[in-house]
């Protein structure tokens, strides 16, 4: 689950969310996420920083509202983030680092020695 925020309201029935390609993997066709609070939302535009959606209920969400987005393909989305939070019974209980985010192909993970010709 991703948390996103309404950052602006670019027109009637539209919301701009801080859920761009830097937050959710972009290799899948739309819809790349399902917004739990707006499951029927139409995806108008998706850029590096923002996702603009259109929905009849959009006007009832003020700027700053937090929405929950379920990614269509979680694997590449997870690798875009430094950590994830374990949520149990509605409360964040643990922070897990995303080690794939900081992989190093030039260092041997067992010895921390450089890999390649000397």
Image (tube, helix red, strand yellow):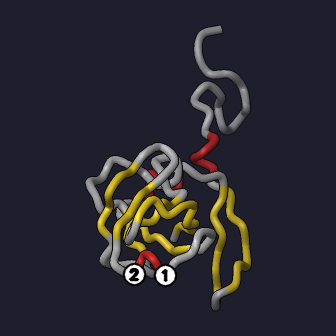
Give residue 15's quadrant in the image: bottom left
Picture coordinates of residue 32 (x, y %)?
35, 60
Q: Residue at x 73, y 73 (%)?
A: 94
Q: Nearer the viewer, residue 55 or 98?
A: 55
Kindly give the residue lying farthest to the left in the view shown.
29
Give residue 3's quadrant in the image: bottom right
| Residue 60 - label | 1
Q: Which of 99 and 115 is in front in this view?
A: 99
Q: Residue at x 42, y 45 (%)?
A: 47
Give the residue at mark 2.
57
Q: Residue at x 45, y 77 (%)?
A: 59
Q: Answer left or right for 32 relative to 6.
A: left
At mark 2, the secondary structure is loop
Indicate the quadrant containing the C terminus: top left, top right, bottom left or bottom right. top right
Q: How far apart are marks 1 and 2 (CA)?
A: 6 Å
Give residue 40's quadrant in the image: bottom left
Picture coordinates of residue 9 (x, y %)?
49, 64
Q: Answer left or right for 103 relative to 76.
A: right
In this rendering, the count of numbered labels is 2
Picture coordinates of residue 25 (x, y %)?
42, 51
At mark 1, the secondary structure is helix
Kindly give the residue lying farthest to the top in the view shown.
118
Whether label 1 touches label 2, CB < 8 Å: yes
In the rendered image, the vertical position of residue 108 relative to residue 8, given as above or below:
above
In the rendered image, the vertical position of residue 69 relative to residue 23, given as above or below:
below
Q: Residue at x 60, y 10 (%)?
A: 117
């Amino acid at each position: 689950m991703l948390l996103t925020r309404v950052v602006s309201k670019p027109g009637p029935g539209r919301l701009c969310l801080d859920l761009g390609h830097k937050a959710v993997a972009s290799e899948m066709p739309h819809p790349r996420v399902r917004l739990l609070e707006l499951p029927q939302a139409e995806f108008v535009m998706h850029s590096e920083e923002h996702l603009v959606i259109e929905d009849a209920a959009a006007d009832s969400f003020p700027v700053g509202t937090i929405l929950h987005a379920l990614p269509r393909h979680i694997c590449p989305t997870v690798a875009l983030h430094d950590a994830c939070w374990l949520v149990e019974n509605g409360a964040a209980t643990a922070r897990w680092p995303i080690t794939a985010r900081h992989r190093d192909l030039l260092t041997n993970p067992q010895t921390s020695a450089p890999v390649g010709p000397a």
